[in-house]
Image (cartoon, helix red, strand yellow):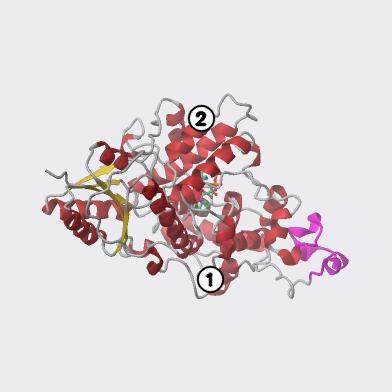
Amino acid sequence: MTVRPILVWFRRDLRLADHAALAAAVATAAPVLAVFVLDDTAAGRWRMGGAARWWLHHSLRAHGEAISAVGGRFVLRRGHSADELARLAQETGASAVYCSRGYEPWASVLEREVRERLGADGVEVKRFAGALLHDPDGLVTKAGTPFRMFTPFWRSFAGGVTVARPIAAPRKIVSPQRVPESEDLASWALLPTAPDWAGGLRDAWTAGETAAHARLASFVEERLSAYGRMRDRPDREGTSRLSPHLAFGEISPRQCWWAAKDAAGRASEGDGIETFLKELAWREFSAHLLHHAPDLPDAPFRAEFASFPWREDGVLLRAWQRGTTGYPIVDAGMRELWATGFMHNRVRMIVASFLTKHLLQPWRTGEAWFWDTLVDADLASNAANWQWVAGSGADAAPYFRIFNPIRQGETFDPEGAYVRRWVPELARLPSGAIHAPWEAPADTLAQAGVEIGRTYPGPIVDHGAARKIALGAFATLRG
Ligand code: FAD
């Protein structure tokens, strides 16, 4: 009697190691077929953005190669997930579909739909944990409610919540005898062609599980120890840059957590390891928030912000998107994002504060731009962080704390190296002038070849005046 195969349905979990669904499928000794469905309808308006689609292409290619290397096959289909999985189950005679549980609100709806649809055909659907450090329903306050504040959430990790050790990748995958046809990845047109804007992304990134582990290993070896001191410096390579790998599940948060923990005992500068674990916990906190508040990407967490007097202005928004606000640290960040699909966390906070406070644009417009342009676009982290900066989020930065983009630049990019890299028209300015070029003496500007208003824009708003207007807008919420 032939054993019916199991389909392993991959989504944003494109890895072989620490993949509970794959490990469980292989452990049954049934043949296993890896499948991926490009479903552009399930996520609604949170359909994958342009930069993420670029990443997905490369990640799928790498994943297919990794599966082949252990004897497996990877079948790609495009369409509605439930329809395609039902079709694949029928074509292969599969007895079950195993998958990792997703935590986006639409992912849970989709999983339910798939379970009902395949269940009707007698195909079992099993979900496994793996995207997070901990099950969000099992990590709550003493009162049994979801955490709304990060500090007690983090304390629960320090005080006994255990993170399971990652599990190994299967050494061999036995494929079914009948493997249905796969669509051709290239035909999905995930890569931009007209125009091809992905040159900077190609230079900056290598997608895939192997690249993710190489990045984690070099980070732990070279930068983890000084992470606490260096993580806020966009002019240095002080952070891990693991976020797109995590966003596509090429590496699991548990693997990152334990790699850092296991490095303890080696020479460490103070709190590097703990600070890194805490950042992984911020990712986790965001995911738990979204799990318990599914409208986090669309509505203010703090209800009073629903009446905030945002000013929707396309001209201001475009200047921000293009990096032509006249504030060098903001423009550098926005141009880094456009060129590489990434922006340093400190600069993300600066540009988000600038958009929502100096320009009074709704946080959702910034959230949408990030969604389309970030290779690490993640529904929970993006929404939670935008709301955190805008002041409307759980445990948010107080609205009245308005970043001064000049001081922020001077503090975190003291020699101006980050600005010089991304705003080359200011490259010849001395460090003391680079974060507020409009205030520089005429001869300094002339020597650097800078003409404000011609080679580089003047500030789009005056910092002091914009700050007052923003505080006035905030006061209407309490008034
Ligand atoms: P590291 O400093 O090396 O940190 C390690 C990991 O911890 C990161 O890879 C990430 O998974 C997690 N992490 C670190 N900081 C945060 C944070 N503040 N919130 C949640 N997780 C964090 N991160 C995303 O992954 N996707 C997003 O769409 C996203 N949107 C953001 C939007 C705004 C407005 C802001 C201020 C931050 C956003 N972040 C987002 C969080 C953060 O900027 C990135 O995770 C971080 O810059 C990634 O770089 P890294 O991997 O080098 O981080």
Is 39 or 455 nearer to us in this picture?
A: 39
Is 228 or 196 nearer to us in this picture?
A: 196
**Residue 412 position in % (x across, y down):** 68, 48
Q: Residue at x 59, y 51 (%)?
A: 344
The amino acid beneath tag 2 is Lys
Which of the 4 image quadrants contains residue 83? bottom left
Q: Which of marks 1 and 2 is in front?
A: 1
In the orientation shown, which residue stands out farthest toward the right?
A: 443
Q: Distance between the residues labelled 1 and 2?
A: 41 Å
Is 248 or 144 nearer to us in this picture?
A: 248
Q: In this view, does 249 lie above or below 353?
A: above
Give the magenta part as a residue range.
427-450
Q: Would residue 115 be visible to someone looking at this image?
A: yes
Residue identifier under label 1: 196
Q: Is residue 207 above or below residue 462?
A: above
Q: Residue at x 79, y 55 (%)?
A: 431
Q: Is mark 1 on a helix, strand or loop?
A: loop
Q: Does the magenta stretch include residue 430?
A: yes
- Is the shortest distance between ligand 1 and the CB of mark 2 under 8 Å? no
